[in-house]
Image (cartoon, grey):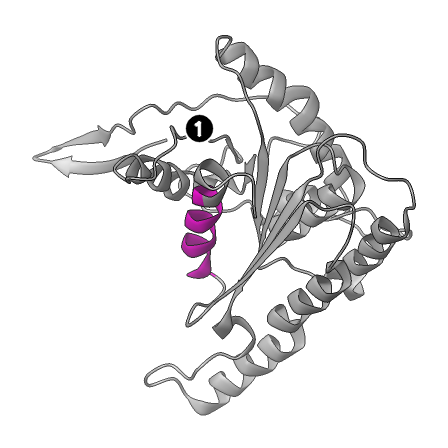
Amino acid sequence: MGETVRMGDRPTPVPLPNSEQFFLDSDQGSNYIVDGNALFLTATEVAWRRAASSHFAGGGLIVAIGYPVAGKLYDAKRRSLDLTPPTESPIPGAGGADAFLGFIEKSVRPAIKARFPRATFSREALYGHSYGGLFALHALFTRPHAFDCYIASSPSIWWNSRCILRSAQVFLDNAKPLDGKLPSLVVSWGSWEQNPPQWNDEPLDHYEGRKQIASDLRMGDNALDLVKMLYGCNRLHKMQVKEYEGEEHTSVMACSISRGLTVFFEDWPLH
């Protein structure tokens, strides 16, 4: 990935150190860090800057999974399919999370290992924001051994009548203990997601409508409901919870990915 700037009359690509882009085919299209089109540059800059830290522990490999949509942050249709869990009654254009997880495990992971044959991976994390956060939770509850850490940023718990909480309950009710290392979970959100302020010069009716949507989605309260359910769970190694003060749904991504990657690369295992 790169960005284009103009020098004189010739556009010149800006190289991104130690990065490359390649394509994989999937039955449902290609979509680690999901929503890679929107988050890869942020994640790589976080990792790059940490090299100057006195606590730097060597960094790691960032795999961002996106779609071939030039100049766009999201492919709304495809991410709605890939990042939402299956339901008892199929929802058109949704419910492809299991297939997408299979794509990551059967296509993405082997491709990464083939591209870096001399690299060894002591641990792996999955980061997702919004629908991606919902996807990370679904992955944890259905495939807890797939990753060592699941980082759910502003997860869309509201989706389909909070069905992910039922999956959480099934995960909790499973009496079979997990073999080997227990996974960890990081949950975060922004304080302004559920309680937004009125912007300067924002018409009152527009603000009231936006505030009502935020109230209906319950991003903070839903996250806290999930955290209360999972508190003390013996199938998790550790759970970290963070509300970022003064951040809304898009701005909080930079906070959660910076803290999440720093914790995973440098403060592991979670305490």
Image check: 73 left or right of 156?
left
Chief secondary structure of the magenta portion? helix
* Viewer-nearest residue: 181 or 193: 181
Residue 78 in picture, x, y percent from top left: 63, 42
Q: Which residue lies most toward the bottom here? A: 204
User: Regarding mark 1 in the picture, which secondary structure is present there?
Assistant: loop
For the point 49% across and 89% down, the residue is 205
For the point 72% across and 63% down, the residue is 226
In this view of the protein, can residue 158 be seen by the observer?
Answer: no
In this view of the protein, can residue 178 be seen by the observer?
Answer: yes
* Viewer-nearest residue: 206 or 255: 255
For the point 61% across and 21% down, the residue is 109
- Tell me the quarter of the picture where residue 60 sits: top left
The relative height of residue 211 versus residue 7 in the rendered view (above or below) is: below
Image check: 13 left or right of 227?
left
Q: Tell me which amino acid carries mark 1.
A: Gly
Which stretch did the figure color magenta? 250-262
Residue 12 in picture, x, y percent from top left: 19, 29
- Residue 252 among those drawn in magenta: yes
